[in-house]
Image: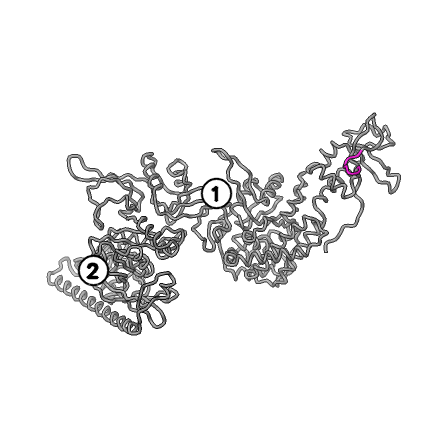
Amino acid sequence: MRNIDLIHTVTRAAADRWPDVLANLGIDVPNSPRIHAPCPACQGTDRFRFDDNGRGAHICNQCGAGDGLDLVKKVLNIDTYGAAKAIAEVLGIDTQSQQTTSQTRELSEAERESRRQAQSESKANEQAKKRERFMARYRTLEATVTKGTSDYLTNKGLTGFTFPLLPDGNLLIPLVDAGGFVTGAQTITPAGKKLILTGSTKKGSYYLVNAPETVSTVILAEGLATALSVHLMRPDALTVAAIDAGNLLPVAEVMRNRYPEATIILAADNDIKLNEPNTGKDAAEKAALSVAGWVALPPTNGQADWDDYRQENGLEAAAGMFNELLYQVEGGKLMSAVEVIATHSGQKKNSEDLKPYLETRPEGLFWIKPDIVKGSSEVVNIEQWLSDPMKPAAKGVNDIGEHYLIIEYGKGEIKALPSGSVGDREGWRILRSAGVNVTAKPAMQNILADWLNTRRNLTKWLVTHKSGWHKGAYIMPDGSIIGTPEQPILFNGQSAAATAYQTKGTLDSWRDDVAALADGNPFMMFSIGAALAAPMAGITLADSFGIHLYAQSTAGKSTTADMAVSLYGDPDLQRLTWYGTAYGIANEAVAHNDGLLYLDEVGQGADPKHVYKSAYTLFNGKGKIQGARDGGNRPLESWRTVAISTGEKDIETFLLSAGMKVNAGQLVRLLNIPIVRATELHGHETGKGHADAIRYGCRDNYGAAGRYWIEYLANHKDAAREAYATATRRWAKLIPSTYGEQVQRASDRFAAIEAALLAGRIVTGWSEQDCIDTVQTVFNVWVKEFGTGNKEIQQIVEQAEGFLTASGFSRYLPYPNTDERDLPIRELAGYRTGSIRNEGEIFKFYTFPHVFEKEIATGFNPQHFAKALSAAGMLEAGGDRLKKKGLKKIGGKQHTFYVLMYSPEEEESQPE
């Protein structure tokens, strides 16, 4: 047989038989791909794994990966053909002729046995040498110990225990194997740092906390402190420290072999982490399942063990909870103490037990109903499929007290089901929409719903559809969490731009390729300051606000906005538009709570009516009151956000062009800022070159800087509040008292951005003075456009002036020298005195009250409107009354008028 034919023949023949083939060649491999073991080829202990996959697949971190043939080559140190011949001998394949002589078979068997013995002896020799080296180290340390109390344990409130202490105060904990021989050791510093002594054999080794005369219960814990706490709770039991989660199963098997009739309890660590496996719980349940044992998991919302629970709640409460929360894992299903059949501890259920149960398998959840075959004693299991694999992971509650059941499915994915929907059509619809198939049979759905609703010992999570700050951590609009929350959080919201919040590049690359290009350009720096202020507002409790950057299409307004939003994610994907409804904008505000909202190009297709409503809703920070289907009202939505908007027109002009008037308060919430092209080009020859560099920089570097900034804020909340308070006090002194109320209010927005720029220098790298100068420059530009007076009074004056200019000579009848040629006057508004022939004579417009209140003062309170005109010198009051009787009787009646005049001339005050 040719060499290549032999190789092909043996690899085909060995398929799915590699564990047996390798064993016959004296090559030991783990019996599970999840077990890491010493490499049989290089003897390295660094994570050798045998996946098999039917072809002997394996991987070693030291000598590499390959298939079964490769492993034989490496272990036996022979070439490929030699390895194929060795495998052929195991499989009985003739390598020379069609017949294999008995003499050849005997020789081959002798060779294999020789190899096995040689490998076994080599392995035993290596283990003996390793043990000798360990014992030398251990005896050296043991000679220096004294008995005493450990600061590590005392700090945890575990007093009265004496242990071997090294001269530096470290604990020395000896670990023994099933025969009672010391095979390993652990040291623990007073600060709690734990190390395994080099050369220790950890697998199956443990530390016995106590030694009761009779053993009916064995409790296993991971660490020493947990074991001691459990010992205080259950002094009757034999308590064992297994050192870590990975060693629970080997130690549990040792205990089961030694105490076959005892109840074994695993005191699990609750290693709960969002979207990650619960290592402590999983390891304890696996060990319990192997030895028919029980599990006790501390009922905490965060990571904790039973020692943590004892410290927080006291020994008596901890002991009570430990005994109450015992449950057993059997066949993939969890059973509490009251659910498990009362057989002797450690014994499995009787096979004739006919109690139905739910079983979890890789292919799904199944309802198993044992039944006796008619006419015989044979028990058969009647199985019905319920759903794809899933399990209740936690219970949740939102900000308004609504409860949820949090389901884990697929590859660690989670979904929050409203508790009221579990078992009804809406609940199943939510699960199916998430990709979880559920039975359509009503009876089976009821069983599944009961199982979901009766899960115990679930931790409690916060469920929220708002982004922003929650429980000390920050939720991004895509649901990712920055910082460590006080309890687990599930984001249940949705944004149209959720996919934008990814990262590309690093903080340093964003600083070099984006922030550096903005340095020296006030409008760009100011926009980035607004972006920095967004998550800071949730800490300082500053009001929602926005900046609207407007200019013609070549001034770089979109480039400026892109720089700002690149702080948190992809600028192209973050970009939303004003083209939508107020309800849609409100939903986005909730999803961007305590965050930045990017609304581009106000004039492109946006309905002015919707823009007006959206702007009011967005910065008001509250949604619309809506009735609930079952009576009452739905909870009122609220949010806090900072928006960056762009357009070719300012918001006021855009709305006025559609006949809509903007309130002065809205112009303080959304600051209209006319921008100009960048002047500091940072070495680029043209503005286009500078803009192109920014565009590429924003798309190659985004997200990382914003996450760093938010994490910084999470750890420096007090510093953020102080920075805002300092900036607010500074700006309160900067604004002259003669400036209008709206300017005073707007100063808070500039203070928020200044505080963010100064605190955010850790991200941008800009100088302190440049940050202060930037905000001052942009304020001067804004106030020049907005004006220094009271904007509302300015709007009232402009509205009245506009009416008089448009209608003063067409709808007012001259008085007293009326010319019949002036008649008839359509929609007469009143009478006009004064003549253009008399230079310097003041025109007075005696206006009918209904015209003044319904037309001139439209959109305002008429009394407030009249008072403002009186203060501005445009209304002649009658003493303490705003209306007065004037002129002689006309048509036999003395009329009452609002007497209006053009506003007196005065020089406009200029901003400082």
Provide the residue designation for mark 1: 400
Residue 669 x/y as whole percent: 62, 47
Pointer 1 and pointer 2: residues touching (CB < 8 Å)? no
**Which picture quadrant has residue 528?**
bottom right
Q: Look at the image and tell me whether residue 70 can be seen.
A: no
First of labels 1, 2 by sequence position: 2
Number of residues whose C-alpha sits closer than 10 Å to that of mark 1, classed few (under 14), some (14–19) or many (20 or more): few
Q: Nearer the viewer, residue 706 or 341?
A: 341
Q: Within 10 angstroms of label 2, few (less than 14), some, or many (20 or more) residues?
A: few
In the shown orientation, is residue 361 left or right of residue 902? left
Q: Point out residue 28 in the picture as x, y percentages from the top left corner.
A: 23, 61
Q: Secondary structure at mark 2?
A: helix
At 87% from the left edge and 32% from the top edge, which residue is drawn?
816
User: Magenta region: which residues?
Assistant: 878-884
The foreground one among 537 and 497 is 537
* Quadrant in the picture for the N terminus: bottom left
Image vertical order of residue 549 relative to residue 451, above or below? below
Residue 23: which disc?
Answer: 2
In the displayed structure image, the side of residue 95 where residue 423 appears, left or right: right
